[in-house]
Amino acid sequence: MRKTFIAGNWKMNMLPSEAAAFIGDLAAKTGDFKYGKVMVAPPFTSLPAAAAVIKGTGILLGAQNMSDEESGAHTGEVSPLMLKDLGVDAVILGHSERRLIYGENDAFINRKVKLALKHGFEVILCVGETLEERESGKVETVVEEQLAGGLSGIAEESLASITIAYEPVWAIGTGKTATPEDADSVHAFIRKIIEKLFSSSAAAEIVIQYGGSVKPENSAELMAKENIDGALVGGASLKVDSFYGIINFAKA
Ligand code: PEP
């Protein structure tokens, strides 16, 4: 039975004091988390403040990125050892903004996935096509390539620590959501690829989030789909009420 997993990616927003206040308010609303698994991913500079208040709330602490190296001459990078020391539970890897703005490719992302697993982090591995790729009929080719590349050399047992986030790039921050049917059919395709790369039980068990303009008004409809197990949320994760509305989708 797959557990619902809602994660908020705060991107380059939220000062330390704002992050701490948000987590306090969210924890007060969500109580004992009968809604499934919940994570927030503050920017690096707000992680210590977030870590100080998140303990004991049941909310997971995520980082938005991580270096592919443990230490050394890597100006501007943040090591998995540093994130571990702060109490970070999970890392988002391969987000489309990292791929498209900062040129991260599948081999580089794969190195980070392996290093994150080595250090005991949960991983949210993001995949998804651009509008141009969708319009030229390449959704499946792109998603398959990103999955095969990102998960190359990963042992099947490690999949228990990996969540896939399907995020069509054209739906991120644009207000355009994939229809629940379209999203579900790509999620079903992702399960097919996981079966091809690993096994049918791995395909049945892997948690797949949808991401792209998810908000309280559309979350119940998306989550009702067989293959959609949760959401990776950007804009709507920045306000406690809207993020809580998504977490609490069954009652929205
Ligand atoms: C994201 O960046 O992961 C995302 C899904 O953003 P938004 O919800 O704002 O579209």
Image: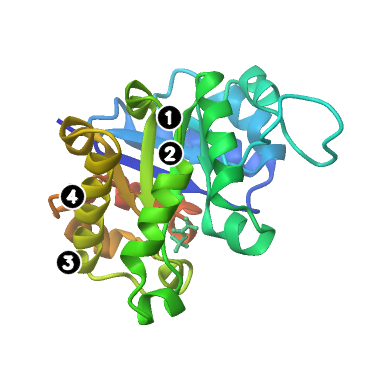
Q: CA distance from mark 4 to mark 2?
A: 20 Å
- Residue, disc 2: 151
Label 2: which secondary element: loop
Asked whether the beta carbons under mark 1 and mark 2 sit within 8 Å of each other, the answer is yes
Question: Please, what is the three-letter code of the amino acid marked with disc 2?
Answer: Leu
Q: Residue 50, image x and y in percent?
A: 59, 31
Amino acid type for the residue under numbered disc 4: Asn
Please name the colour scheme applied to the rendered image. rainbow
Residue 118, relative to residue 122: is it above or below? above
The residue carrying pointer 2 sits among few (fewer than 14), some (14 to 19) or many (20 or more) residues within 10 Å by Cα, namely: many
Question: Marks 1 and 2, how far apart in space?
Answer: 5 Å
Location of residue 94 in the rendering, given as x and y in whole percent from the top left corner: 53, 49
- The answer to which image quadrant residue 180 occupies is bottom left
Q: Which residue is mark 4?
A: 227
Left-right relation of 137 to 153: left
Mark 4 packing: few (<14 Cα in 10 Å), some, or many (20+)? many
Please say whether residue 243 is visible from this viewpoint. Answer: no
Q: Earlier in the sequence, mark 4 or mark 2?
A: 2
Q: Earlier in the sequence, mark 2 or mark 3?
A: 2
Q: Which residue is mark 1?
A: 154
What's the distance in space between the residues labelled 2 and 3, CA to CA?
26 Å
223 vs 94, nearest the viewer: 94
Between 159 and 59, the one nearer to me in the picture: 159
